Amino acid sequence: MALADSEVSSASATQPGGANARPVDGELSVELTWSPVRGELRQQAFSVSAGTTVAELLTRSGWFESDQIARLKVGVWGRVQSLDTALQAGDRVEVYRPLTVDPKEARRQRYKATGRRIVTRHRPLGRKA
């Protein structure tokens, strides 16, 4: 993650005092995180009104075109959520990139390259169920 490329700013009204400032009454502090390409991380803090949805936050960020937003996979604190989910104070909204390689295919390619089988705790070598 390139922190130099990271964009951290605050939008809307918060009381003076930096990143740990309390939001103005009726406002919620939320964070939007997105990694458009491997190694780059964008983060932006927002102060939004109660009842704001994930889709409204994405529109407000300016990172995405309006027609693109409907196709995005998003989550809050690592759990996939729909775009009409209402935000709560302290939420971290994450925008997920699509997979570039099927996980099963990636495992086959690693096996082909190394010749070693990947051992998991569920099925140790030598014992087949």
Image (cartoon, rainbow, N blue to C red):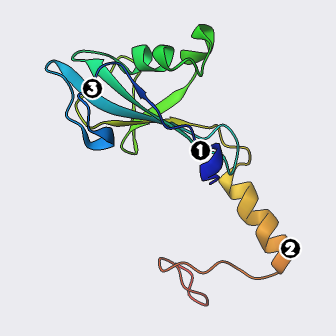
Q: Nearer the viewer, residue 122 or 89?
A: 89
Q: CA distance from mark 1 to mark 2?
A: 30 Å
The answer to the question of whether label 2 and label 3 lie on touching residues, with beta carbons closer than 8 A, is: no
Residue 86 in view in this figure:
no
Residue 110 in view in this figure:
yes
Look at the numbered disc 1 and give the secondary structure of its residue.
Answer: loop
Q: Nearer the viewer, residue 107 or 33?
A: 33
Q: Which callout, 1 or 3, points to the residue nearer the camera? A: 3
Q: Badge 2, how many Cα within 10 Å: few under 14, some, many 20+?
A: few
Residue 51: which quarter of the image? top left
Q: CA distance from mark 1 to mark 3?
A: 24 Å
The answer to the question of whether label 1 and label 3 lie on touching residues, with beta carbons closer than 8 A, is: no
- Which residue shows up at 66% across the image and 37% down it? 36
Residue with the mark numbered 2: 113
Q: Residue furthest bottom?
A: 126
| Amino acid type at image mark 3 | Thr
Residue 41, disc: 1
Residue with the mark numbered 3: 14
| Amino acid type at image mark 2 | Ala
Where 25 sits versus 125, above or below? above
Q: Nearer the viewer, residue 124 or 64?
A: 64
Image coordinates for residue 108, horizontal then vertical, percent: 77, 64
Image coordinates for residue 44, horizontal then vertical, percent: 47, 33
Q: Nearer the viewer, residue 110 or 13?
A: 13
